[in-house]
């Protein structure tokens, strides 16, 4: 019997509201979206009642970089389940050793060591713990409006709205505007353990930093002996057209955090990858950080297959080709809807559509459900719709996404009763 759609949608929603999250159920009902994930395959997800099919342009921030239920990833988990289980995190492990070797082979220079985890927040916590342990200093600098997860230290580094209700949090966290080197320099001192930034902050609204920003961060970190942490939870594993988003800025951090996509969308696993010179602290304290299910052995084999797919000849070329198609198409859309779509932000397939008002992002998300797209507004800047299609998307599907976006933007304009600017120009299709 299928695991999907056993009950009516109404019954699922009612049960979810009663036992999982009444708040979410209420929010989505108010929002006018009653989508319940049912069948899923490749770039598509279906509503549980089978009535609606969407192209997933959210990809859960990169979890579905390889689309939904990629056959090779599913097969890797099945194979692993024939022989392995989670394993025992206290002991040495063949699977963890193998994955760490493969993962670090994809990293520049001496990013050669790995601590595994289950969630991205946990992996960020580990990075900050390591930076503090390594330097013996307390202070951590991050960006206003950034997002690194909801766990302890990651939460303290993120946007105020998520951490305020839980104060007092760990002290020593200060924030600067993203991309502002002068502010970073003013904040940095010899009490600073780490500076942590997302390569392209997604929740902030897919904000592209000035091209020289990360080289400047690297220089400042070197000058003050500060650990440079780069959060690649969304930008990593091919999203920006290179294995790591930070590679596109030709900078090597001291710690690189990867999560979401490493799971292949199938088995949660995350990694905090760090440079050799930082190893002394964990070498001397090998049991100071523990994660029972971090680096679960079956998950290691899933992640290995993710890396196999990513490393195949032509995979990153494909990402770059699809990015070019989007660049052209989104440029045309901006020309057709200039009063609504005011800016296209893009690095590879990490894309954001900046709309003319913060009220438009949620409306676009809603329109997506009507016109066949899953795309979600950025929570810390709701004027931006995040556009992160699976990296395996094909040219005809890119075209479908662009056509849907065209309809969504037209719907938005119609709803807002804006004059039909751009009429007479070429249709994006
Ligand atoms: C940039 C970034 N860092 C960290 C996290 C936290 O990951 P997780 O939800 O797996 O804890 C997220 C999650 O969305 C993220 O986008």
Image (cartoon, rainbow, N blue to C red):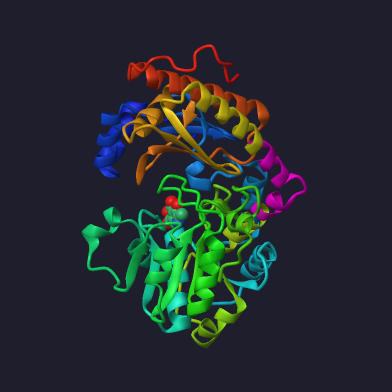
* Boundaries of the magenta span: 306-322
The one nearer the camera, 148 or 344, is 344
Residue pushed farthest bottom? 284
Report the residue at 57% width, 62% height from top. Answer: 85
Q: Position of residue 343 (x, y in %)?
A: 47, 35
Q: Position of residue 23 (x, y in %)?
A: 25, 41
The one nearer the camera, 353 or 120, is 353
Specify whether residue 319 is painted magenta: yes
Residue 7 appears in the figure: no
Report the residue at 61% width, 25% height from top. Answer: 399
Q: Is residue 241 above or below residue 418?
A: below
Q: Quadrant of residue 47?
A: top left
Q: Position of residue 383 (x, y in %)?
A: 37, 37
Q: Is residue 66 above or below residue 85?
A: above
Specify whether residue 309 is painted magenta: yes
The one nearer the camera, 418 or 194, is 418
Quick check: 318 left or right of 126?
Answer: right
């Amino acid at each position: 019997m299928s695991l999907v759609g056993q009950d009516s949608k109404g019954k699922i929603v009612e049960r979810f509201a009663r036992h999982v999250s009444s708040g979410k159920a209420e929010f989505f009902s108010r929002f006018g979206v009653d989508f319940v994930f049912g069948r899923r395959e490749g770039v598509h997800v279906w509503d549980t009642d089978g009535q609606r099919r969407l192209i997933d342009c959210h990809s859960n921030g990169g979890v579905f970089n390889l689309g939904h239920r990629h056959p090779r990833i599913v097969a890797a988990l099945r194979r692993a389940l024939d022989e392995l289980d989670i394993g025992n995190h206290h002991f040495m492990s063949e699977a963890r050793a193998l994955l760490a070797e493969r993962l670090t082979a994809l990293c520049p220079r001496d990013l050669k060591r790995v601590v595994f985890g289950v969630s991205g927040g946990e992996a960020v916590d580990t990075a900050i713990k390591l930076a503090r342990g390594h330097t013996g200093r307390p202070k951590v600098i991050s960006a206003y409006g950034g997002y690194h997860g909801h766990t302890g230290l990651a939460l303290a580094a993120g946007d105020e709205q998520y951490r305020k209700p839980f104060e007092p949090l760990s002290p020593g966290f200060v924030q600067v505007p993203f991309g502002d080197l002068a502010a970073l320099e003013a904040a940095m001192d010899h009490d600073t353990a780490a500076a942590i930034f997302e390569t392209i902050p997604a929740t902030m609204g897919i904000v592209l930093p000035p091209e020289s920003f990360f080289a400047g961060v690297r220089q400042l970190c070197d000058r003050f002996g500060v650990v440079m942490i780069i959060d690649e939870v969304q930008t990593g594993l091919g999203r920006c057209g290179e294995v790591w988003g930070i590679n596109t800025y030709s900078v090597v951090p001291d710690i690189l955090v990867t999560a979401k996509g490493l799971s292949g969308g199938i088995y949660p696993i995350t990694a905090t990858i760090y440079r050799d010179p930082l190893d002394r602290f964990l070498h001397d304290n090998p049991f100071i950080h523990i994660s029972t299910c971090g680096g679960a052995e079956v998950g290691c084999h899933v992640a290995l297959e993710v890396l196999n797919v990513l490393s195949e000849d032509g995979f990153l070329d494909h990402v770059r080709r699809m990015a070019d198609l989007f660049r052209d198409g989104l440029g045309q859309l901006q020309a057709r809807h200039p009063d609504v779509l005011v800016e296209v932000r893009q690095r590879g397939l990490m894309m954001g559509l900046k709309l003319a008002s913060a009220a438009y992002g949620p409306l676009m998300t809603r329109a997506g459900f009507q016109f066949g797209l899953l795309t979600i507004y950025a929570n810390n800047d709701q004027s931006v719709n995040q556009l992160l299609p699976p990296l395996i998307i094909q040219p005809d599907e890119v075209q479908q996404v662009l056509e849907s976006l065209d309809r969504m933007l037209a719907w938005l304009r119609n709803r807002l009763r804006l004059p039909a600017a751009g009429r007479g120009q070429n249709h994006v299709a």
